[in-house]
Amino acid sequence: MKKKLLFVINTLGRAGAENALLELLKRIDKEKFEVSLYVLTGQGEMIGKLPEKVKLLNKSFIPVSVHDSEGRMHLTKTVIRAFLRRANFIRLAPYLIKNGFIMLKNGRILPEKLLWRVISDGADRRKEKYDLAVSYIEGAAAYYVHDHVRAKKKAAFIHVDYQKAGYTREIDRECYLDFDRIFGVSGEVAEVFSKAYPELSDRIGVFHNLLDNEGIIARSTEGEGFSDGFTGMRLLTVGRLMAQKAFEVSIRACRLLKKRGEKIRWYVLGEGDQRRKLEALIDKLGLKDDFILYGAVDNPYPYIRQADIYVHCSRFEGKSIAVQEAQILGKPIVVSDCSGNREQVIPGEDGLICDFNPKDIARSIEELIHDKEKSAYLAGNARNKNNNEDSLDKLLEI
């Protein structure tokens, strides 16, 4: 008899956790395991990448990003349906009011953290019992696996700095106490989570993202990549346009570089709810031709391969797959000094770590622009870094 596995994720968009999940699903032996996937929002542009023999449980699915207009409209409808389903708007009112007041008191309003509970409780129920159910991301997926899935064993993945991302035991209703295993995607992620749940120290471990190194290298030679004819230094960042990524800081760093006469152009591959705000700042600082919000692309690897420097300066991370991909493709890298990044880059060996402010970001980039020998040294070490990987046995042995 095949063991039955269920994986649950919030969306299936073009982002790090989703890519890591697809790679994991690809590697599971389908002769030994019957694998199912449930996407709580029923949307995401990466659905076409779902490996064969993985059963999608959603009754309907739209292949659009949650960040474009159609996707946002669909997500809004999903939330409204979830509110109305099973009288959730009445049953969840005390939870939403209590945690809303806590957020207000702490001066940090994060409505999406509350809506994950609504989406989870409004989703379809599963009658089947599984040998292992896996919540592959925080929020709705964890709540759904905990509350609404029957399984002999349950595991959860944490992809972010639990505290800085705004999660609390109150918001989660301490659901993680009932999981058999919890995996952080980096040592720092696991450590931060263990501080929130110290009693689970014997169940918390690290499971690094799985990457297809050879596939990344092969795909970097496919497609056109940059086609604007720019002859200066290309800086590149891959990431969603969201508050966590703090692109307003990178934009101001770009302005400093331009004021100093550096011939650079900074590109960002990704979409998100911060686009209009960032575009306004770009226009205000006169950087319309210098800081390019390129949008999301299906294959970012030709762009990474053609870039001169990869920059990843955000407020916090879990473990950035984009940084790992840039390392695989041998790029000199600048990252901000934050959780996640510190574990991925050894300063002066395979990249530079800078303070999270425009001045130090610009200084680090200038260092690589003008010290070609150091830049080549860092790039070579990045290319030779062991980015692979972890063993599926850590998960499947459960």
Image (cartoon, helix red, strand yellow):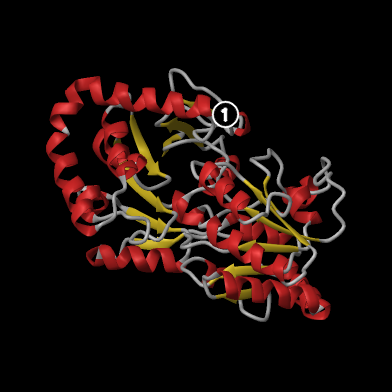
Q: Which residue is painted at 43% across and 57% down in the image?
A: 160
The residue pinned by badge 1 equals 53
Side (left or right) of 33 relative to 158: right
Query: Badge 1 local density, few (<14 within 10 Å), some, or many (20+)?
Result: some
Q: Is residue 66 above or below residue 77?
A: below
Q: Is residue 255 above or below residue 71?
A: below
Q: Which residue is painted at 29% across and 41% down in the image?
A: 143
Side (left or right) of 74 relative to 320: left
Visible in this render: residue 133? Answer: yes
The residue nearer to you, when weighing 346 against 355, is: 355
Residue at far top of view = 59
Q: Position of residue 183 (x, y in %)?
A: 41, 57
The residue nearer to you, when weighing 213 against 350, is: 350
Side (left or right) of 103 relative to 333: left
Visible in this render: residue 127? Answer: no
What amino acid does circle 1 point to? Lys
